[in-house]
């Protein structure tokens, strides 16, 4: 949580954290400015002190919503610095930050965060360190202070994820009803004009549902049928018709409008009667999901649950990443991931070496076992989002039932 940032800075020997870049699509910046609707900014956070937000004067009123102390970037007169640098933009950028660092007493080990162009920032940070003798540029390769802080959420953050989940479940319910509202001709769902209902038609309903609920789609929703359902991240082909008896993997992961919190859930549907092989596999998948979620416990190592999943799947005759690192048929991925300002964040429910994540109070994460056989023309996944409350209780935030078969209109 945010209250942990100073502690994490101290543990890692970081004297100042500088967050840079645009707001949208930049979870760390969104996090530190508390979702203020800015275009871009610089945030200076010294250890043990409140963060300072630097932004353009055109956004000064939006910046006030951050709750941070706001400084107008114009006071540093970048154009004057650029002129004195003879038009050399790298030299001017260094001079600009020198002025900021001097005003706020930034020195020691300084780490930069946010989303930037990597090559340009490599050159800039090297030049900055050379120009400022009292500054050492620090770097964190993974699990940096902000990613670690974001691994646990406070009650307000959980409530926002819950609300995103409520809206997401409404969309899934609508799409299920939309599918079932069509009649079948020759094993294919058809529209009123007699043409086949397609994946593209379903995605249009999904997009409209998001827009009506002020959710956005950062990456195309997964709506894949038949063989494509057997490839976990196939988005589905727009021209594919919706046919009876085939699995549809519907994985929806919308974000709050403006770049806020995500939700993530998956349901598998078959329109009409499912073949016996698919029914049997789906029953196994439900049993696996129930076994895992019944075992969720606050403070437990997240890696335990991937091990449990592999144990279950292998006992039921499915290959796993443990038995075959290049597995493509059976259970082919890790069990889950954290959900927050990024669709994939900590904790990670994987047994990869070095994963020390635990299901700590404040964790919000997915549980999403799946079974995939693309060569047989099917795949399936069930995904719910869970959170660990401060008292150690665990709640499923996905308030939508499971169910494989959808009965179409006769």
Image (cartoon, rainbow, N blue to C red):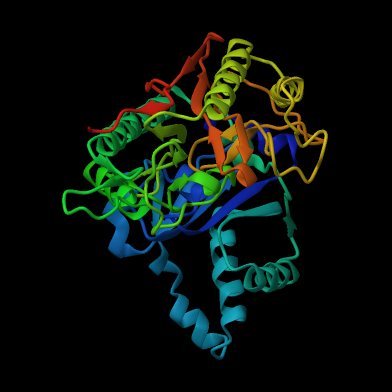
Q: Give how far across and how far down residue 326 sits, in percent.
A: 78, 46
On the image, which quarter does residue 11 sit in?
Answer: top right
Q: Give how far across and how far down residue 283 sits, in percent.
A: 55, 19
Horizontal side of 381 relative to 248 (left or right) equals right
**Which of the pair 241/314 is nearer the observer?**
241
State the residue at coordinates (59%, 60%).
Answer: 101
Judge whether 165 appears above or below 67 on screen: above
Can residue 224 be seen?
A: yes
**Which of the pair 357/23 is nearer the observer?**
357
Q: Give how far across and how far down residue 360 sits, in percent.
A: 62, 20
| The N terminus - image quarter | top right
| The C terminus - image quarter | top left
Judge whether 368 appears above or below 230 on screen: above
Tally of numbered discs: 0
Horizontal side of 109 relative to 184 (left or right) equals right
Residue farthest toward the front in the current orientation of the protein: 186
On the image, which quarter does residue 353 sit in?
Answer: top right
Q: Give how far across and how far down residue 302 sits, in percent.
A: 69, 24
Residue farthest toward the left in the current orientation of the protein: 192
Judge whether 83 appears above or below 318 on screen: below
Judge whether 115 appears above or below 46 on screen: below
Horizontal side of 373 relative to 44 (left or right) equals right
């Amino acid at each position: 949580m945010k209250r942990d940032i100073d502690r994490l800075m101290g543990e890692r020997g970081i004297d100042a954290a500088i967050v840079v870049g645009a707001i949208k699509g930049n979870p760390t910046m969104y996090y530190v400015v508390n979702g203020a609707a800015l275009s871009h900014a610089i945030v200076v956070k010294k250890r043990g002190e409140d963060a300072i937000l630097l932004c353009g004067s055109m956004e000064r009123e939006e910046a006030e919503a951050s709750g941070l102390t706001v400084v107008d970037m114009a006071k540093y007169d970048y154009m004057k610095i650029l002129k004195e640098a003879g038009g050399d933009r790298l030299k001017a950028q260094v001079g600009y930050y020198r002025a900021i660092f001097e005003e706020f007493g930034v020195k020691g080990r300084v780490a930069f965060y946010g989303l930037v162009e990597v090559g340009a920032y490599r050159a800039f940070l090297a030049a900055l360190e050379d120009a400022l003798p009292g500054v050492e540029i620090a770097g964190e390769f993974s699990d940096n202070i902000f990613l670690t802080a974001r691994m646990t959420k406070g009650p307000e953050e959980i409530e926002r994820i819950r609300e995103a989940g409520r809206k997401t479940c409404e969309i899934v319910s609508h799409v299920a009803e939309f599918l079932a509202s069509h009649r079948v001709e020759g094993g294919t769902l058809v529209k009123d004009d007699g043409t086949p209902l397609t994946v593209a038609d379903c995605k249009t309903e999904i997009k409209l549902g998001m827009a009506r609920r002020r959710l956005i789609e950062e990456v195309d929703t997964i709506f894949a049928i038949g063989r494509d359902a057997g490839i976990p991240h196939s988005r589905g082909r727009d021209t594919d018709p919706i046919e009876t008896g085939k699995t549809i993997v519907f994985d929806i992961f919308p974000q709050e409008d403006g770049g806020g919190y995500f939700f993530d859930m998956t349901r598998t549907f078959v329109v009409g009667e499912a073949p016996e092989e698919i029914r049997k596999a789906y029953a196994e998948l439900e049993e696996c999901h129930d076994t895992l979620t019944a075992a969720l416990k606050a403070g437990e190592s997240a890696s335990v649950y991937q091990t449990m999943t592999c144990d279950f799947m292998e006992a039921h005759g499915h290959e796993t990443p443990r038995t075959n690192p290049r597995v493509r048929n059976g259970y082919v991925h890790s069990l889950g991931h954290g959900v927050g300002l990024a669709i994939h964040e900590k904790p990670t429910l994987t047994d990869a070496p070095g994963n020390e994540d635990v299901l700590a109070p404040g964790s919000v994460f997915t549980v999403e076992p799946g079974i995939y056989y693309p060569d047989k023309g099917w795949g399936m996944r069930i995904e719910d989002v869970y959170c660990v409350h401060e008292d150690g209780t665990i709640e499923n935030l996905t308030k939508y039932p499971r169910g494989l078969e959808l009965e179409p209109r006769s």
